[in-house]
Image: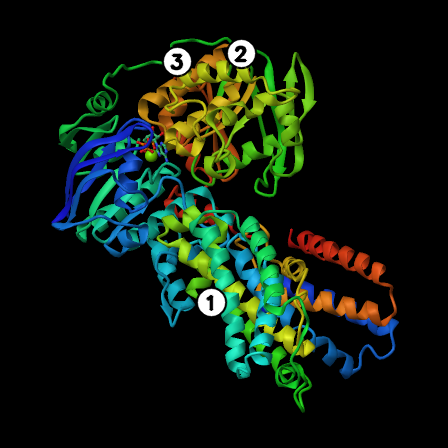
Amino acid sequence: MGLKIGNLSKAFAAPVLRAVDIQIASGEIRGLVGENGAGKSTLLNILSGAIRADGGEILLDDEAYKPASVRAALDAGVALATQELSMIETLSAAENLALSRFPSRFGIVRRRHRDTVAKAAFASLGLSHLPPSLLASDMTLADQQLLEIARASMHGTKVLMLDEPTAALSREQAGLVHDLIRAKAAEGAAILYVSHRLEDLKQVCDTISVLRDGELILTKPSEALSIPAMIEAMAGTFAQRDRRAAARGEGPAALRVTDVTTAELPHPLSIEVKAGEVVGLAGLAGAGRSELMRAIMGLDARSGGRCERLVDGIATAVTTPADAVAAGIGYVPEDRKMSGIFAGQSVAFNLSLSALRGRRATPDSWIRERGAAIRDILKIRSSGLDQPIEQLSGGNQQKVILGRWLMLDTPVLLLDEPGRGVDVAAKADIFDEISRLAAAGAAVLMASSEMDELTSTCDRIAVMSGRRIAAIFEGPEWDEAAIMTAAFSAHVGGSAAGNEATRAGVYHD
Amino acid sequence: MTELAARVARHGRDNFIIIAVALVVIVFGVLSEGFFSAGSAQILLNQLPTLMVVTVGMIIVMLIGGIDLSVGSVVALSSTLVATMIVSHSLPLPVAILIGLAAGLALGLTNGWFSTYAGLPSFIVTLGVLEAGRGLAYLVSDSQTIFVGPSIEALALPLYGIGVSPAFLVALGITIVAHVLVTRSVGGRYLVAIGTREQAAQAAGINTRPYKLAAFAISGTLAGLGGVFNAAYLAAADPNAGSGIELSAIAAAVIGGTSLMGGRGSVIGGFIGVLLIAVLQSGLAQIGVSEPMKRIVTGVVIILAVLLDRWRAR
Ligand SMILES: Nc1ncnc2c1ncn2[C@@H]1O[C@H](COP(=O)(O)OP(=O)(O)OP(=O)(O)O)[C@@H](O)[C@H]1O
Ligand SMILES: [Mg+2]
């Protein structure tokens, strides 16, 4: 019983999967790791029926399994929670959940039944605050991700696959997802769990497989595989780095935010970032970190306060996104799919976009030269600068968006989860690059849900809780317990329920 | 009570258009004698069936993010076919009507196949069919208006007692059924999903192509029915019938809240859009506005209606 994959191969322009053999028993939780572009999503997409393999054989419960479509896979009990979220913005939460199989009578949706099912599914993932009729476009990224997982888990009775399910989630939410995974495994589903959060995999999975360049390198019980060993298997080499060793000199204030309020941020917020400094924004989901960045960029209308960009002590007010970019502020949004990438356009186009500002002609040779340099620095894996960006693996798309602001030496960077979906080695490269930029005089404000990303890179960490700045910590020594306490401070008792209560507030109006 | 308020708020979009229609009606009521007479309302309603069914089809195609520019030519082809079948081949009316619908279905499937399975933009495909369909209508009718007479006209004549024609009742029924199907049926939800983000719909396990094909097929068939209604209204088939109706249908759809980008649309809203345009045109005619002014005013009102709707939706 379970899933047996033999000799599976797939090539796009170049081979992506090379004769992969994997067996997963029913009830087994299998972790799958590999660098960005190793072929993890491709493997999952073949199993989910989204794309066809070139060769090889798959057996599901000892019967040949070759899904011709996602529909066929779902009908066979194989479901995937995709890496690129697939919510339909114009449909409600309940409709999105039911989309793969609407409860219906004579073709008409049974709406009450649909909403009952939705409420039960939401409750199991801590989404009780979500009204079933809420449009997906009004949901937070984390909630969309949870909904995607809920949908897959309803159909993945034999095989449930999750492609970086916790990338946009807080610790507590990730915990709920892990509970769900364990419950599905206990019911007899074979689980295939892809993540770059290696500790999570070690904790949750029975066994872990490593994919490198489309080849299966090893499969081991998770107790028998240490994290350094995993990284070494993924990359071929492993070198521990210490980023903070390169001390930075602090410069004058480069970005000053004074008493800013918006519809989402009712309490006035102030923060200052100096040239040559990396300031981290820590906090739980819904704490207001992304909202603060959007407010600074002028993407959300401000109801009060000021944002100023300071150059040599001279302040320029920033009110619109165009002001912000003109003043040298670059922004990497949290949600790359909706507001980051230009799908259908080449890597070069996506890299060059913000560098074109103020130029009359497209300096093509410059874009190619600089683009190639960025591609090397961030180790972006693409067939060339002309490859359409949507063909890149998720982590490599993320690197392109970050690279967009590196094309020019952007003096102020607002980075919302810059390491999301990026593999361990590439993450190290990205944070190295951020440190290098700061050392060269850039001012960086960076939100992250991963404590180690913050503590390894930041000079100061501002902790947000309940849409206020609860505390600011100074490095280089960090008291992680104190940071966590501050993150929970808006929720008396510090429970997940408290967290939910504020998150429910997001949907209050 | 609060539930009622919530419902009203939810249907605010439709209500807004209703208010707009009401305003237009009142303005004309004040400006022109006899605009409020039952007779004038009946005459107005009985002109509408063709545009009503064509608009329903257009909205369904727009929901999936497509467009059907061929509807006017399908109207003409269907009506000339029906007329020829009755006049030259002495076929009974129901059979002739079925042939008209079948022609609409065939062109709709053509539109759908090329825009779905061959992956061409529907704008281009249906533009081609607009040309070719009109040519076919000329061929069928030998470029002549074909007089049919009372057998088919009965469809368009007011029924005794209620004052509206059978054609109007059928068109109204189709509008209501289509509204229910779009909002309540699984297929309707799929159309919305496909029009919003086709890839995501595929990832959710929807085989999108049959649904897209079906949307074009429905639009073609409804345009075929529109041709029948048009022949009934004129008691004759005109190979030039229906030219430009695609633009009226798109305007009505957009006024009623349907997005040109796909994924958002209301069939009832489109019906009210049809009413708004019709009331406006007949009202302007009644108060004696010249043809050029009529067109200018209609154009301005279309843009204003959509603008106000956008502004209100914020
Ligand atoms: N449609 C496509 N056309 C061409 N190349 C593709 C296509 N889809 C994926 N690839 C290539 O296949 C390789 C593997 O991609 P895949 O998405 O499977 O990586 P991954 O292991 O999931 O990486 P990540 O951790 O970044 O999500 C990448 O180099 C990518 O560029
Ligand atoms: Mg991937």
- Residue B287 location, x and y as percent? 87, 70
Task: Please tell me in which quadrant of the rendered image residue A354 appears.
Answer: top right
Please state which of the two labelled residues, at mark 3 or mark 1, is closer to the viewer: 1
Residue located 62% across and 58% down the image = B257
- Residue A118 location, x and y as percent? 38, 59
Q: Do the residues labelled 1 and 2 touch (CB within 8 Å)?
A: no
* Figure quarter occupied by ligand 1: top left
How dense is the environment of label 1, judged by Cα within 10 Å: few (below 14), some, or many (20 and up)? some
Q: Does the residue labelled 1 lie within 8 Å of ligand 1?
A: no
Q: Distance between the residues labelled 3 and 1?
A: 58 Å
Q: Nearer the viewer, residue B33 or B45?
A: B45
Q: Circle 1 is placed at which residue position?
A: B184
Q: In this view, does A447 lie to the left or right of A163?
A: right
Determine whether the residue tagged by mark 3 lies in a helix, strand or loop.
loop
Residue B96 position (above or below residue A145): below
Amino acid type at image mark 3: Arg
Q: Is mark 2 within 8 Å of ligand 1?
A: no
Say which chain tag 2 marks: A
- Residue B123 location, x and y as percent? 57, 50
Q: Circle 3 is placed at which residue position?
A: A244
Say which chain tag 3 marks: A
Residue located 36% across and 39% down the image = A83
Residue located 61% across and 25% down the image = A325
Determine whether the residue tagged by mark 1 lies in a helix, strand or loop.
helix
Q: Circle 2 is placed at which residue position?
A: A441
Amino acid type at image mark 1: Arg
Q: Distance between the residues labelled 3 and 2?
A: 15 Å
